[in-house]
Image (cartoon, rainbow, N blue to C red):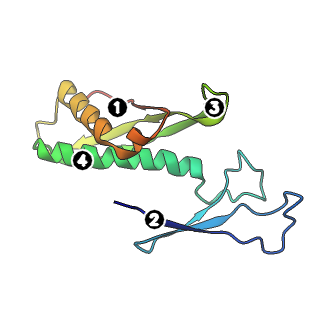
Amino acid sequence: MQFEATLEWKRDGQDFPGQRYSRAHTWRFDGGAVVPASSSPLSVPLPMSDAAAVDPEEALVAAASSCHMLFFLSIAAKRGHTVDSYTDHAIGTLGKNAQGKMAMTRIALRPAIVFAGTAPPGDDELHAIHHEAHDKCYIANTLNCEVVVEAPAA
């Protein structure tokens, strides 16, 4: 399997050697989605960054969160549980890794899940579903940083 994205950036006459150029660019995906992207204003100050755009660090955190959620939903359905909503306030921490390089050092997933019906999974089963989802998540399996699930008990 392969997955593709197209990235587009243009200088538009800005002062490239002087580092006074916009880091804003566009991500295009095969399904037609077009996402405004930029460096984070935490890394490159405004106006060279676009605070309204998605930055690569946010995208990485969102990808890890989304991957975990998609596996969680599938596993919960297979176990006979109906999920009405799933909200995750995921937080990625950028810091120095063991080699002293800046890297995403931790991603904390904090899902809040609402189940339908009168028999939601208990704490042990909820933990087992999260554990299986984490084990199956392609993104978590790819990353070098710690990815943890800080889900509240049922």
Answer with mark 3 or mark 4, whichever residue precedes in sequence: 4
Nearer to us of marks 3 and 4 is 3
Which SS class for mark 3? strand
Residue ID for mark 4:
73
Residue ID for mark 2:
4
Kind of residue at disc 2: Glu
Which quadrant of the figure has residue 26?
Answer: bottom right
Vertical order, 89 against 17 (above or below): above
Which SS class for mark 2? loop
Kind of residue at disc 1: Ala
**Pointer 3 with pointer 1, Cβ within 8 A:** no
Which residue is located at x 42 percent, y 72 percent? 30
Residue 151 numbered tag: 1
Count of labels in the image: 4
Residue ID for mark 3:
95
Answer with mark 2 or mark 1, whichever residue precedes in sequence: 2
Q: Can you say which quadrant of the picture contains the N terminus?
A: bottom left
Residue 132 x %, y %:
25, 35
Which SS class for mark 4? helix
Q: CA distance from mark 3 to mark 1?
A: 23 Å
Which residue is located at x 55 percent, y 48 percent? 58
Nearer to us of marks 2 and 1 is 2
Answer with mark 3 or mark 2, whichever residue precedes in sequence: 2
Report whether 154 appears left or right of 96: left
Q: Can you say which quadrant of the picture contains the C terminus?
A: top left
